[in-house]
Image (spheres, rainbow, N blue to C red):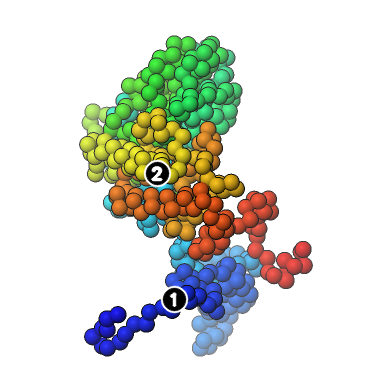
């Protein structure tokens, strides 16, 4: 062991030494954090207010500090118009440092894309470029009001219009609805367009929507919510839609097919065009769940595959935050057959460059078939600005590379782990944006949940678990295009190690995680008897 310039020699740890519990409960920089009710109490406040007490009366006399306090209290009374609290609010009073430290410590116990690789990928946590955030915060985008006169928000409407044009071009569709606030909201928009189109044809009797097993779970929920009857279409042994079964079910009572492509098994539906032709042949429509558009953007145009309606999750493909601290965004692209039935409002750019917002008052006779509104206003401006920034910074070639790199990364994970974990559709050809594994081959009594908990100890957020339902003990991993080979190699090594422990029956996995702020919960008890309200210990015991 070398000695540094000062002559100090570091001491090596004693072999086999065991750390003693700490007085604070802290473990190095992993700080134990109490509930906010345990830090402060409801009888005190962390902020000093001058002259706390009864409000001063008008004309009160005083001198020195008393006079100053009287004046302060009088002004406060005037500002509050007599609306003083007459009861405690039941919240603990914390000083500013206490409040900041509490929430900062809690944030350190969370996992995010800024910390490391996120196996949930674009479904929940795709990297959000900081350039997007900078553009979304520009004055004129961040501080506009939805009720401003249209002439004062031409720049914002220009962003919405240009993004709409890009999305139409990238998907090969005819029209678009920008107002839906999320993917499932977009699904509802598309299904309502289909419903309106059928009713306009006098075919409102079509009440059946076919949904393949490999589709997203929101698809049947949306169809049922819109008043349709849902029927399942089975998947083949290779994880794709059973085209023969679908064609056999088509008939005059079918309104639409809702299909996810690429599907939730991470596979591209190769028979998509044949499926669309068959559906159109019986007078029905094709709805495509565009949640996985990230895998094919710049490579495949859904419109060329016969799609009539498809929602686009801007957070999945175009890097906006998932929800963005408020409503998200799920624009819906529409075929020429469905575009006339799309919702209001929408933007229209005229030859002189002026952009109008077409609403009920201005739709006139040009848009008689619209089914109405999806939302009070036009959409989520912050998401539109971020998505357009992402598109313009990448360009057409860059967006194509996004899909290529996302698919490459997913296949690298699939082929690197298929000898360790069972890959049910590994022989079906290359996957798309996500690699799918099952719990087959794990030791008796071990399951996907044990692998996921072991990954937490390795410093990774678990992958999507138990979905899709067509695979028992599913583990769905979506790396996205932004992960480096080094990052993927580290994750692969960690997952391989945990999987091998599960296959060997390592009993320590049953109590994992061991290094997280909290150990494994009793999941049955947590689900059946969740403790959602804090009570003072004395009151809690009395209640029991």
Crowd around label 1: few <14 · some 14–19 · many ≥20 (10 Å): few
For label 1, the residue is 15
Residue 268: % across, % down: 38, 29
Left/right placement of residue 166 relative to residue 148 reads left
Residue at 28% of width from left, 37% of height from top?
404
Residue at 40% of width from left, 29% of height from top?
428
Left/right placement of residue 532 relative to residue 10 reads right
Q: Is residue 484 above or below residue 225?
A: below
Please count the marks in the image. 2
**The one of 150 and 388 positioned closer to us in this rendering:** 388
Specify the quadrant that holds the N terminus.
bottom left
Mark seen at residue 417: 2
Residue 39 visible (yes or no): yes
Q: Kindly state the secondary structure of the residue where label 1 is placed.
A: loop
Marks 2 and 1, the one that precedes in the sequence: 1
Q: Is residue 254 above or below residue 54?
A: above
Mark seen at residue 426: none
Of badges 2 and 1, the one in the foreground is 1
Image quadrant where residue 508 sits: bottom right
Left/right placement of residue 41 relative to residue 1 reads right
Crowd around label 2: few <14 · some 14–19 · many ≥20 (10 Å): some
């Amino acid at each position: 062991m070398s000695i540094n310039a000062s002559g100090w020699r570091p001491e090596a740890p004693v072999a086999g030494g065991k750390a003693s519990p700490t007085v604070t409960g802290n473990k190095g920089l992993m700080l134990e954090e109490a509930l906010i009710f345990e830090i402060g109490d409801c009888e005190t406040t962390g902020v000093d207010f001058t002259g706390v007490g009864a409000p001063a009366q008008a004309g009160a006399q005083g001198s020195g500090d008393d006079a100053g306090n009287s004046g302060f209290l009088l002004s406060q009374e005037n500002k509050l118009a007599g609306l003083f609290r007459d009861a405690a609010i039941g919240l603990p009073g914390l000083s500013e440092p206490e409040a900041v430290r509490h929430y900062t410590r809690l944030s350190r116990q969370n996992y995010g894309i800024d910390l490391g690789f996120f196996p949930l990928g674009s479904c929940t946590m795709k990297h959000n470029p900081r350039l997007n955030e900078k553009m979304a915060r520009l004055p004129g985008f961040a501080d506009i009001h939805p009720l401003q006169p249209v002439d004062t928000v031409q720049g914002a409407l220009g962003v919405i219009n240009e993004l709409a044009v890009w999305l139409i071009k990238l998907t090969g569709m005819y029209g678009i609805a920008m107002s839906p606030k999320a993917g499932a909201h977009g699904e509802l928009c598309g299904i309502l367009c289909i419903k309106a189109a059928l009713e306009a044809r006098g075919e409102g009797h079509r009440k059946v929507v076919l949904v393949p097993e490999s589709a997203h779970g929101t698809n049947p929920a949306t169809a049922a919510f819109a008043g349709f009857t849902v029927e399942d279409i089975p998947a083949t042994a290779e994880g794709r839609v059973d085209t023969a079964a679908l064609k056999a079910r088509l008939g005059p009572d079918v309104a639409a097919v809702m299909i996810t492509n690429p599907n939730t098994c991470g596979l591209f539906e190769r028979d998509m065009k044949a499926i669309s032709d068959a559906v159109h042949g019986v007078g029905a429509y094709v709805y495509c769940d565009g949640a996985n558009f990230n895998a094919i953007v710049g490579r495949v145009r859904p419109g060329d595959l016969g799609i009539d309606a498809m929602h686009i999750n801007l957070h999945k493909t175009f890097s906006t935050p998932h929800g963005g601290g408020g409503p998200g965004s799920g624009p819906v692209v529409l075929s020429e057959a469905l575009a006339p039935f799309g919702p209001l409002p929408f933007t229209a750019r005229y030859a002189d460059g002026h952009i109008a917002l077409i609403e009920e008052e201005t739709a006139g006779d040009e848009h008689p078939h619209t089914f109405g509104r999806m939302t009070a206003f036009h959409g989520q401006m912050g998401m539109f600005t971020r998505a357009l920034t992402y598109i313009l910074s990448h360009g057409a070639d860059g967006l194509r590379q996004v899909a290529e790199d996302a698919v490459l990364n997913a296949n690298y994970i699939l082929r690197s782990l298929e000898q360790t974990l069972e890959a049910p559709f590994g022989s079906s050809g290359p996957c798309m944006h996500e690699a799918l594994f099952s719990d087959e081959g794990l030791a008796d009594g071990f399951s996907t949940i044990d692998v996921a908990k072991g990954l937490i100890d390795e410093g990774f957020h678990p992958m999507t678990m138990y979905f899709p339902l067509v695979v028992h003990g599913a583990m769905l991993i979506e790396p996205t295009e932004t992960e480096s080979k080094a990052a993927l190699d580290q994750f692969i090594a960690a997952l391989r190690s945990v999987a091998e422990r599960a296959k060997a029956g390592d009993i320590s996995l049953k109590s994992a995680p061991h290094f997280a702020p909290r150990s494994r919960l009793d999941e049955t008890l947590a689900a059946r008897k969740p403790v959602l309200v804090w009570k003072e210990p004395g009151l809690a015991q009395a209640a029991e």
